[in-house]
Amino acid sequence: MYDFLIAPFIEFGFMQRALMGSLMLSIGACPVGVFLMLRRMSLTGDAMAHAILPGAAAGFLLYGLQIVPMTIGGLIAGAIVALGAGAVSRFTVQKEDASMAAFYLISLAAGVLIVSLRGSSVDLMHVLFGTVLALNNDALTLIAMITGTTLLTLAIFWRALVAECLDPLFLRSVSHLGTPVHFIFLGLVVLNLVGGFQALGTLLSVGLMMLPAAAARFWTTRVEPMCALAILIGFASCVAGLLLSYHASLPSGPAIILSAGAVYLCSIVFGTRGVFNTRTRHHRHRTA
């Protein structure tokens, strides 16, 4: 049991850095995923994950696989797409979901094209799917800063974020925080996706944000326990995925996301608000 569960994280520095980075990502990204889900913006997270690709690719084209240029490029691209999609939906007849889809498709194609201009297929795979086992100290520092910023922002705007999930019109009627909080929250989404793409790539970083949150939804209805449970599920998924990757020689990023997906599927069936317990309560109610 020691050799299977503990030894890989004790004996190898790359496993320690991968575990530390993925756990820090879970602390910041999973609560953001809970608010995305409660605001019915889950697919927006996926669109924003694609949106950061051209900026990260531009940083790669100019400076290679260096974390600072790729991070700055990803932040700029994500901000442009978020603001552009919002402006189109605000000033034209097109709804936000359609404008977001259009912008993210353009961004995805542009990012793949930019990487292909200079890099190889290996570089493209690195940008799209990440290399959590190759995290260095600079990447860990960046992830730690993003996680700290996320937690501080959530603590400051917690009540406003919860109120906007429940009734955004009420929040805007009683406070001037409605619109600013919306854009601050979108900034947190972009920030955590930029942190996540170093480990999981632009295509999979949203998985660690959304799957633990979606799984936690089947166990509780309160926001605070839901965020805490999502973080715990994220932790378990990261540990299980890294161990599966190590022992079975599988890609680490997909292994982490598939582990989170397995927890999600189990939660659908066995969660306190899942299929099994819901049908059991319904049957007892009918026979009572």
Image (cartoon, helix red, strand yellow):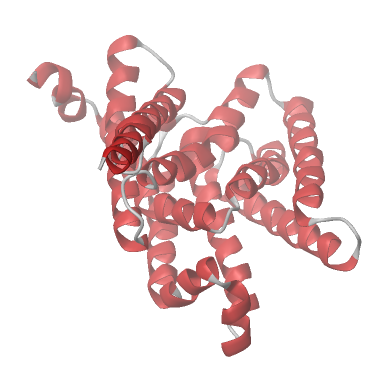
Residue 219 can be seen, yes or no:
yes
Q: Is residue 252 above or below residue 91?
A: above
Residue drawn at x 38%, y 63% as measured from the top left: 148
Q: Is residue 5 left or right of residue 218?
A: left
Identify which residue is drawn at 32% across, 10% down.
248
Horizontal relation, residue 255 to residue 270: left or right: right
Instruction: Classify residue 107 by image quadrant.
Output: top right
Q: In the rendering, at what x and y percent does residue 97 appear?
A: 75, 50
Please provide percent x and percent y for residue 39.
56, 59
- Residue 196 screen position, x and y as percent: 49, 43
The residue depicted at 28 percent of the width and 29 percent of the height is 15
Question: Where 30 sits versus 11, above or below?
Answer: below
Q: Residue furthest front?
A: 288
Q: Which residue, as the protein is rendered here, is positioned at the far right?
A: 92
Q: Considering the image in quadrants, where does the N terminus appear?
A: top left
Query: Which residue extends farthest left?
Result: 2
